Image: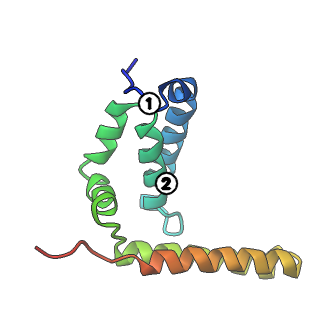
Amino acid sequence: MEQEQPGTGGAERSRFRFAFMALGFVCVGLGVLGAFLPLLPTTPFLLVALWAFSRSSRRFHHWLYTHPRFGPRLQEWNEHGAVPVKVKVSAVSAMAISFGFLAFVARVKWPVLAAAGALILVGATYVLSRPSRPPGP
């Protein structure tokens, strides 16, 4: 088991280590699926996986952060908060489709639809406000 630094919540992390690691692997799986399925976003799942691995396994955190395919996007986010245009389009499209599903297929009551719309609007605004690429040299 990894050594924890004093004052970093080591007891809390070790108690939930398995749960964080399981969450990390589930999110990596969903992220990999998202690489092939057009409406399933990859990056948000990989960001959650990276966070979960940071609390459970340095080895898997390093593996994901330096992965040849997924690592560069995660590093851009970590270092610059950048979200590529393709990811923005995918995320906002998925939000719009989800809202349409709630409105026209599930036919939820208007207070639920308004709350979902407000949350989607907040999420979309945040994603769109992020830079699309890291700053130049």
**x 53%, y 80%: residue:** 125
The x, y position of residue 66, in whole percent, is 25, 46
Q: In this view, does 35 lie to the left or right of 95?
A: left
**x 44%, y 33%: residue:** 8
Sort mark 2 into few (<14), some (14-19) or many (20+) by Cα contacts within 10 Å. many
The x, y position of residue 39, in whole percent, is 53, 69
Asked which secondary structure carries label 2, the reply is helix
Q: Is residue 107 visible?
A: no
Image mark for residue 7: 1
**x 71%, y 81%: residue:** 100
Q: Is residue 29 visible?
A: yes
Name the residue that disc number 2 marks: 45
Task: Say above or below: 47 vs 88.
Answer: above
- Which quarter of the image is occupied by the C terminus? bottom left
Image mark for residue 71: none
Report which quarter residue 97 is drawn in. bottom right
Q: Three-letter amino acid code at disc 1?
A: Gly
The x, y position of residue 99, in whole percent, is 69, 78
- Mark 1 or 2, nearer chain start: 1
The x, y position of residue 133, in whole percent, is 27, 74
